[in-house]
Image: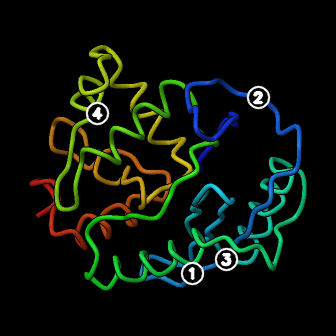
Amino acid sequence: MHSEQVSRPAAAPDAGPAAAAARRDWARTRLATPIGPLLLAATEEGLVRVVFHADERTARRETARLERLFGGPPLPALPAPATAAAADELTAYFAGELRSFTVPLDWSLSSGFSARVLQALAAHVPYGSVVGYQDLADRVGEPGAARAVGAAMGSNPLPVVVPCHRVVASDGGIGGFGGGLETKRALLALEGVLPAPLF
């Protein structure tokens, strides 16, 4: 589905991958949505992970992975306002009441080129719009990197909030999506924009 690299510190996404050396406090919750359950994980810095199709099995597998990355299990009493804020904002988004996410993000599961592309996507491709892989490569100053942009979308640890569903093929096709094409279509339909060939 998605593969990530871990980088430290969270404030410097271009710092490069490094192993999780010390425990990081984190919390998680599952949220029922029209596209299926989402697993949300947050550190004290912000929302760090969104996982599609988070049934019990998927949630257990991702929780175990995050336990390895963060050096221990989630803390049930962790005051992680980003988890609650993300759940509230996603609920409003799926109800058609929110167009822009403001929840703080922890970028520590992205690094280098992927982090640059994902941050540009989050900052410059608003609700109800789409961008091509090549256009996004151009926006980050890497005009020959359309395929690498596709790989960055596949590694997005924060789908929906960092809207990789808004990246489409230049020929008008929907492109790929780690959460599945039906999920991508549903998100684009929610935002009122689908590539012309899908109508």
Q: Earlier in the sequence, mark 4 or mark 3?
A: 3
Neighbourhood count class around disc 2 (C-alpha, 10 Å): few under 14, some 14–19, many 20 upward: few
**Mark 3 and mark 1: Cα distance apart in space:** 7 Å
Tags 1 and 4 touching, CB below 8 Å? no
According to the picture, the residue beneath numbered tag 2 turns out to be 18
Neighbourhood count class around disc 4 (C-alpha, 10 Å): few under 14, some 14–19, many 20 upward: many
Callout 1: helix, strand or loop? strand
**Mark 4 and mark 3: Cα distance apart in space:** 32 Å
Image-quadrant location for residue 138: top left
* Image-based side of 72 in relation to 44, left or right: right
Image-quadrant location for residue 15: top right
According to the picture, the residue beneath numbered tag 1 turns out to be 31
Tags 3 and 1 touching, CB below 8 Å? yes
Which residue is located at x 76 percent, y 29 percent?
18
Callout 4: helix, strand or loop? helix
According to the picture, the residue beneath numbered tag 4 turns out to be 133
Residue 29 is marked as 3
Q: Nearer the viewer, residue 131 or 175?
A: 131
